[in-house]
Every structure is written in structure tokens, then in C-alpha cells.
Image (tube, rainbow, N blue to C red):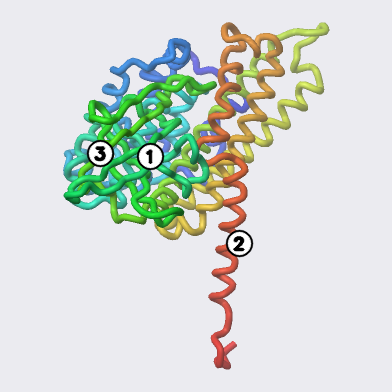
Amino acid sequence: MASRTPVPFSEPPWLNGLPSPYYNESHRRWQKICRAFIDENLTQHAMNWEREEAVPDEVWHKFAAANFLVPSLPAPLPVQWLKKLGVHEMPGGLKVEDWDYIHTAIYTDEMNRSGLAGPPASLTTGMAFGVPPLIKFGSKALQERFLPDLLLGKKRTCIAITEPGAGSDVANIATSAAKSKDGRHYIVNGTKKWITNGIWSDYSAMAVRTGGAGPSGLSMLMVPLKDNPGVSMRRIKVAGQITSGTTFIELDDVEVPVDNLIGQEGMGMRYIMTNFNHERLTIAIGVTRQARVALSAAFEYCMKREAFGMTLMDQPVVRHRLAKAGAELESQWAWLEQFVYQMTRMGKDEADVELGGLTALAKAQAGKVLDECARCAVLLFGGNGLTRTGQGEIAERIYRDVPGARIPGGSEDVLMDLAVRQLVKNYQRKTKQLERPKGSSKI
């Protein structure tokens, strides 16, 4: 069958044959491998699963068996651990040591091609955000206990930060972890809310308060969840991302071995903030693909829908609306490509300092772009865009996903403020480094 001409805005420019300095042959090969596997096992089924509000359990096992969960981790991959577990190559033959952040971005983009955030999030969120704290900061003994099963998909985890009284205000977390009298356990009490993948998770990389008020009192623990005494979990129904397993977790005198401490006591805030950079960048990439799906669906509809004796595309006002949304979409994608490329040329510590604030800004902007493109799609689909079935169903469902893009991972206003504060901090630090030492005559 002859391949179809892509609808405008339906693919990023590099996949439409336009030149790009960012992608090499391994990236292009990886994209083809991703699309074939993900289309067959996720994209073509995603709408039905979202309607049914559940992704079948076997999908997780299929992705794990094919090693299609590990790509959600930050780059570079944990090469030593993967090789220890017998994983020397990613799907398609790419050596694990040759993996870079552009491969990660391609995977994230492809996982979101259905336009629906829920089904891919049901598979990747725990691996993408719950495993990295253990890899980066966990002791060797803690890694030995948990990483083999988590990296191979034999067990599941999640990241549990948010609480009913502490969302973007991470320093205000109240869930407590006090040591038992014998000093062998932390006794954890509190609640976690809006925890993606929590309902299926065997463990959680959880933010807890081991000390006094403020950020210096926070730590992170690996907390067993499933069938653990004192832990109760229930799913929360949210507006969008219905299949992602959003969970409310209650912890009542839960005993957690002190050996489950990730890193050091009191360092939890640093670990959480570092983890946020990968989370926010990958959210931005996935959200931008959702915006692409919404806008291209509306574009295609406008070329065939007739009103007032002509197609919608023949109406100047419609073309203007599409152009406005399209400009925002492609500008956002170009910015993200630049970010991802920079990640391949910078060390982790340098990237955290130089790009951390801008990553927060990119995530916030991605949510705004999705809002523009999804709203554009709903308006151009008209009544069909309000309907949960039929031609406009994709637009209606993506529009319901918009708040889930603008709030989790740090709400929009908080992230925009964080971005500027970080830029000011970096500017002041660099300016001070240029100052001439007192008593020095050197220019």
C-alpha cells in the first residue's frame, strides 16, 4: 500500500524529510523500531483502553519482555546495571552505552502518538520517575535489593511526592517517618494523593519527613506498598489521563526498614528537585506530541468539512486559527529539540544547574501550547468536538487531558516563577565569578 502524505503538523519536521542537525542514523533507526512496536502494542488500542478506563495487564508484561520500559529512564542509561542483568542492547541492537537523550525523546514522542496521555503513562511513569532516585542516590545494597526486578519489569514502582496539603509546595510535605524504639524501622504515617501508577506498584520512592519543618527535614524511602500492613490504596477518578492509575495512598503506622533509606536523611529535597528535571522535560515532549495530534486532526477535518458552501479550510478565519496554533506548536518543538541536544553535550550536574530552570519553563509552556492546540481543535470540530464519540472524539479527549499537563510535575505558575528565580541565581553566581578579588591589580 502506498504511504500516505502526512497531514500538516502531524509529524515533527525531521520526520517529514526536512534536514535537521540533531538526528543521526542510530536515531532514525530507533524511531522506526519504536513506531513499529508502539503502534502495534499501544497506539492502535489506546482509544479503546481509554474508553474502558483500563490498560490490560498483559501490555505491561509485553513492554517489559521487549525491553520497551527502560527507554523511559533518563539518559545516559544505567549501563553497569543493565549489563549485569544481561541487557547489553536496546531493541534494534543499539548498545546501551551509546544511548543518548535524543533516543529518549524519540521514545517519549512515539509513546504519545495516540494523543492520549493515560495509556502511555500507565506503562512508563513508575519506571521513568520512580526508579531514577534509586539509581542516582541509593546505596549499593539498596540497589541490589530492588533494581534487578524493577529494571526487568518484574516489579513495579512509583514516585510518591504529592499530598492533599502539599503539591507544588514540596517543602511542606507532612507524611512522617519516625524511627522505631529499636532503631530498625521507620514508622511512616500520612497520605499521598494523585500518585500515578500507585495502584499497581509493589514499591514507591516516597518523600517523607524524617526531621523538622522545611526542606532540610525531608528524606526519601523505598516504601513497600502491595500487601504491606498499614498501606491502603484506591484509584482516583480524574478529568483526563483516566487509564494512568491515579492513586490515593494512606499510610498508617507502616514499618519500613531503615535500610530502605535512599541516600542520606535530610537530602530528600535535593533528590526530588533533581528528579523533576527529567520528569518535566519528558512531560513537555509528550504534551507537545498531544498538541500535534489535536492540531493535525483539526487540520484534516477542516479540509473536508463544509459550511456556508465551502470547506472550513476555505475560510480565512479558520486558516488564521490553525496558523496561530501551528506557530506555537512548532516553536515549542524546536525549543525542546534544542534542550534535548544540549542534554547530549552536557554532564548531568552542569545540565541541572544551567537547564533546570529553563526545563521548568519549557514544561509550563508545553501545557499552554497544548491548551491552545486542543482548544483550537475543539472549536474547529464544533459540535463534534464536544462529543465523546465520533469524528471529534480525539479532540474532546485531548482537551480533557489539558489540566493534567498544566498541573502535575509542578503547576504552571510555580514553574514559571521557579524558572526566573533560577535564571537570576545563575546570573548572580556567574557575575560574582567575574568580580576581581580584593587587592588584585589584575584586569
Q: CA distance from mark 3 to mark 2?
A: 42 Å
Which residue sits at x=29%, y=30%? Answer: 231
Give the percent coordinates (x, y) of residue 390.
Answer: 58, 6
Q: Nearer the viewer, residue 416 or 1?
A: 416
Give the percent coordinates (x, y) of residue 442.
Answer: 56, 90
Q: Is residue 379 left or right of residue 111?
A: right
Quadrant position of the C terminus in the picture: bottom right
| Crowding at mark 1 (Cα within 10 Å: few <14, some 14-19, many 20+) | many
Q: Quadrant of residue 73?
A: top left
Q: Quadrant of residue 122?
A: top left
Q: Is residue 318 above or below residue 130?
A: above
Decide which of tag 2 and tag 1 comes sooner along the chain.
1
Q: Which residue is mark 1?
A: 129
Which residue sits at x=67%, y=30%? Answer: 372
Q: Which residue is mark 3?
A: 89
| Residue type indicated by callout 2 | Val
Q: Is residue 9 above or below residue 417?
A: above
Q: Which mark is residue 148?
A: none
